[in-house]
Amino acid sequence: MRSVTTLIGRGVEFVLFCLLAGMVLMVFGNVVLRYVFNTGLNFSEEMARYFFVWLTFIGAVLTFAQHGHIGVETLVRTFGRRGRLICMALSNAIILLCAGVFFHGTWLQHEINASVTAPVVGISMIWVFGVGYFSALGIGLIAAYRLLRIVTGRMTEAEIAHFAGEFEAPASDAKDLSR
């Protein structure tokens, strides 16, 4: 299971890299065209904005998967194992609820967004705002999986410590300061 999630994570990282590289190329290219040749590409401004939206929402899923979002670790550190598990369960249940609301809101707006086209590039706006489906499903599935692991008692001590902000860098990342 771990290798599948690692493969998916690497795929998402590659998509984020491509979006960021595309954004940089479009914006930089447009700046060069405007200042050197006194012209520009209209579509690059609009597509750079859309890439930024996709980058943000897809990045939120990856950040959630890697426990990168802000947490209230000061409070959680004061609890024992049981209190930390309760906090983990509550936070993941709330996140799952919010992901459900987000998915439902994207679903309600789907028809409207599908019928509106972008002013310059002419694509359906569902290609822009439809990233809400990916974000809601990704975050919701991760939260549901974490809840399942908490309820079934398969949450490891390392994961609980990571949730509480008590994690250490792996040995390969630590610098040898004895020299």
Image (tube, helix red, strand yellow):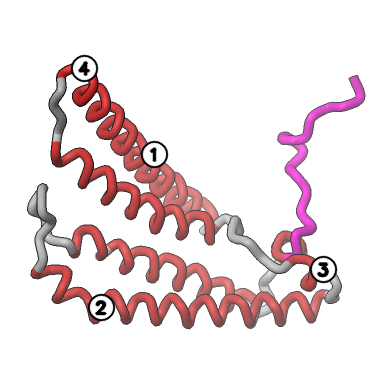
CB within 8 Å, label 1 to label 3:
no
Q: Residues within 10 Å of mark 3 (few under 14, many from 20)?
A: some
User: Could you tell me how far apart the alpha carbons at marks 1 and 3 are, in whole angstroms?
Assistant: 35 Å
Residue at 41% of width from left, 65% of height from top?
138
**Residue bearing mark 4:** 36
Type of the residue with mark 2: Trp
Nearest the camera: 6 or 21? 21
Q: Position of residue 77 (x, y in %)?
A: 82, 68
Q: Are marks 3 and 2 in contact (CB under 8 Å)?
A: no
Q: Which residue is mark 1?
A: 17
- 41 versus 72 height, above or below: above
Q: Residue shown at 71%/68% (left/top)? A: 72
Residue 148 appears in the picture as rendered: no
Which residue, given by chain and number where applicable, does mark 3 sit on? 77
Q: Earlier in the sequence, mark 1 or mark 3?
A: 1
Q: Earlier in the sequence, mark 3 or mark 2?
A: 3
How much space separates mark 3 and mark 2, taking CA atoms?
A: 38 Å
- Viewport quadrant of the C terminus: top right
Q: Main secondary structure of the magenta part?
A: loop
Q: What segment is highlighted magenta in the picture?
A: 164-179
Marks 4, 2: nearer the viewer:
4
Question: Label 4, label 1: how many angstroms apart (C-alpha)?
Answer: 28 Å
Q: Nearer the viewer, residue 41 or 77?
A: 41
Q: Secondary structure at mark 3?
A: helix
Q: CA distance from mark 4 to mark 2?
A: 44 Å
Comparing 179 with 158, the one in front is 179
